[in-house]
Amino acid sequence: MRKTMLVVDRRYMNHFAGQVHPERPARVAAMIEMVESLKRAALKHSAPRAASIDELLLCHSVEYVAEVERTSGCERTDFDPDTHASAETWATARLAAGGVLTAVEAVLDGEAENGFAVVRPPGHHALPQRAMGFCFFNNVAIAASWLVKVRGIRRVLILDWDVHHGNGTQELFYQSPEVLYMSTHQYPFYPGTGWLDQIGSDAGTGFTVNAPVPATFGDDEYMRIFDQLLMPIARQFQPEFVLISAGFDAHFRDPLGGMRLTEGGFLAMTQRLQRLADQYCDGRMVAALEGGYDLRALAECGRTVVNELGRDGGDHINAAQNAPRAEPIIQRARYFLKDYWTLDMDN
């Protein structure tokens, strides 16, 4: 069995966005209950550290970090109609960014082979100078920037399977050839970004790959997109570290999304990414929690991913089944990316 580092802490429940807000403390409570039920000997646990100010500044402006810090101790601060801070949000958001860094450090330093950071609040909508979409600091983007700028990693892959497009992550790396950002997401949907022709700019052209999909796509369509579009590009990129923005709101039970993924779909995506990490970067991969608002689906999908992270490599991966609805998206994405990656336009 692989050694998997789980970063989890009850302090992630201290951020409070409102009585009826979907991004609620119970999300972490459900994940903690799931984690406590796991008995695998190779499963390691670590408390998160808080991200330093300098680490937050890897992705966010001085002015914005100070704006979030000023919410400390305030009962409620509204950043937008969906994104609200409470007295403990500043401290909790630093722990969220630091929790992903804790898992990444453990993998880099050989303490674990891969990891899962059960963090909150989520991060992939957070822009350099703006909170939005329940997010304050871009947890996964900070980890990717830290890998590149602090630890000297040259190629980082971020795969974002949250039902919402990670507009913040895309913007932060839109001009970077060092971070390949890939996203599957419902479209049209919040936040309205992530169309096929958004492929990066300047030196980063080709290093943003979007697969916007309509509501009701499920396991077969996702696997066809992975096998025919995302994984071929990822293999050419040859990542030195893999990060997953692991939202579980594309599950069929989620109240906010309109997708039809099952636990089997999340298993299949994890299998493909772990196989990729095994091939190119000694299995170094960390998943970080993003969205997911049905507590049962959240816990079961989390269990599925953590169990797969612990499985030894080499297992057979079932190929994608016939999913004709995915074909037009794959072909259009290939059209926009064909000058930057070798893609089979006929298959």
Image: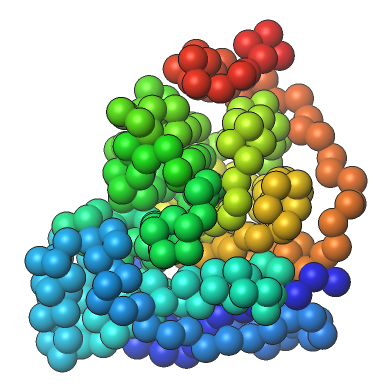
Tally the numbered discs: 0
Residue in the image at 35% along x and 87% along y: 14
Q: Is residue 209 above or below residue 166?
A: above
Q: Quadrant of the C terminus?
A: top right
Residue in the image at 45% along x and 43% along y: 178
Q: Tell me where residue 100 appears, x and y as whole percent.
A: 48, 71
Q: Is residue 173 above or below residue 307?
A: above
Q: Tell me where residue 141 appears, x and y as whole percent.
A: 39, 57
> Considering depth in this image, is 261 or 204 the residue closer to the camera?
204
Q: Tell me where residue 261 appears, x and y as whole percent.
A: 63, 47
Q: Quadrant of the N terminus?
A: bottom right
Q: Is residue 287 left or right of residue 135?
A: right
Q: Is residue 299 visible?
A: no
Q: Tell me where residue 158 appears, x and y as whole percent.
A: 51, 49
Q: Is residue 316 left or right of residue 116?
A: right
Quarter-of-image position of residue 25: bottom left
Residue that extends furthest to the top in the rendered view of this protein? 346
